[in-house]
Structure formats: C-alpha cells, structure tokens
Amino acid sequence: MQTKGYIDMEITTKLKAQETARDLAYHMLAEAFRLPVPGYTAVLEKLRKALADLSSEACKEVECLLESCRNAPDTDALQVEYTRLFLGPFSAPAPPYGSVYLEQERRLMGDSTVDARKHYLTMGVDLSPDFKEAPDHICAELEFMHVLISMGLKAIEDSDYELLAENVRHQRSFLLHHLGAWLPTFANKVMEHSQAGFYRYLAAAAAKFVAEDMDGLAEIEDLE
C-alpha cells in the first residue's frame, strides 16, 4: 500500500505539472491573439516556457516568433497588421471567429456561435462585459480552454479524478466541435495572407499545439 501511495503521488505530481503547462499555454495563446501592446514579448516568453515544458513541437514556431520580435519589435506595425488581418469581419482575410469557418457562406453569429456560448454557460462561466467580441472569437475559445484546465487542476488538488475525467471529456468535446475544428483553416488563412512573420509563426504554433493537445487528451480521459 505504501508503494501504491508513492506511485499515486508521483503520477499526481507529473499530472499537475503537465496541466499547469497546458493551462499557461492556452492562456498565453489567448493573450497573444489580442491587439499587441508594449511588453507583448513577455507573453511570448511565457508561452515558450509552457510549450517547452510540454515538449511541444510548437515551441520551435514560438522561438522563431520571438526572433522575429527581436528583429522588428515595433508594436505600432503589429497593430496595423492585426487590424488588416483580423478586423472586419468579412473584409478581413482571416476573421478570428469560429462560425466563419464552421457555418455555410462564412456566416457570423451562427448556430456554432450559440453552441460555443452554451459550452461556457454549462461550465458556469460567461463572457466578461468588457469583452466586445463574439463568443466564438479565437481569444474567447482559447481562454475557455484555460478556464477548463484550471477547473481540472482544482479537481487534481481535490483528488477528484471522476470530476477530472468529466472535465477532460468536456475539453475534448469543445476542441472537437469548436476550436480544434476551425483553427487549422484559420491558421492557414493567416499564414497565407500575413505580411509579417509574427502572425504566421503565431498561427502555426497555435494550430500545431492544439492538434497535439487533442491527441494527448485521450491519454488521461479514462482517469478515475
């Protein structure tokens, strides 16, 4: 029994470290897709650390991203590129809304938008009044994954692995039907139309990390 307890504690410690890194990765990706402000490289450094802790292949893109910032750290130029790429929504070459890619005729605020918000409400959270975008904006969906993982970490702290398994199923469902379903197409649009290496690398990193994460979630889904 002592051996089993030791193994359980070791597994729990590793799981907490993994989930803490996932939590930070989603949170920093959400921050990175906001309008750039001075000091934005601190977000990228935290993102790189989280991805490195997860041994994610996406870490390479973030390293290239940081290198591009060192060569051209102009926040004003990035804000111009952000506006050109993402705002519109229909005149923008890469609208950051899930429904544009999941609904017919690039429809904004469709059924998938409503379903995304249902996911939020089911977990007892909702958009902040200060957030003026649609519920399926990339920042909202990335931030929701951050919230879900934070809830999962609380379940680990409480040794409630039944609740953790339920939480992981919700994470997988949300990725399969929302963020993970449209992010690859969105990332391709960004990489095709971006005139700055910053957003090409960021989009590639996000798509690669989320794809890895969808595969990796299956490994802990059956925890009890």
Image (tube, helix red, strand yellow):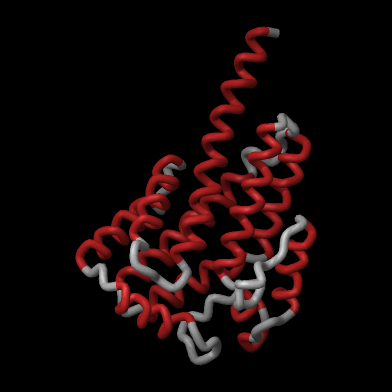
Instruction: Tell which of 158 and 19 is nearer to you.
Output: 158
Instruction: Tell me if residue 142 comes above or below residue 108 in the rendering.
Output: above
Where in the figure is residue 223, as x and y percent of width and height?
A: 71, 34
- Residue in view at x 43 percent, y 75 percent: 190
The residue that appears at 65% across and 84% down in the rendered structure is: 108
Residue 70, position as x, y percentages in the image: 22, 62
22, above or below 86, in the image: above
* Residue 205 x/y as whole percent: 42, 59
- Asked whether residue 207 is in view, the answer is no
Identified at 64% across, 88% down, the residue is: 105
- Does 172 sit left or right of 214 as displayed? right
Q: Position of residue 203 (x, y in %)?
A: 43, 66
User: In the image as oriented, which residue stretches furthest toward the left?
Assistant: 71
What is the residue that sits farthest to the bottom in this orientation?
A: 91
Q: Quadrant of residue 140?
A: bottom right
Quadrant in which the N terminus appears? top right
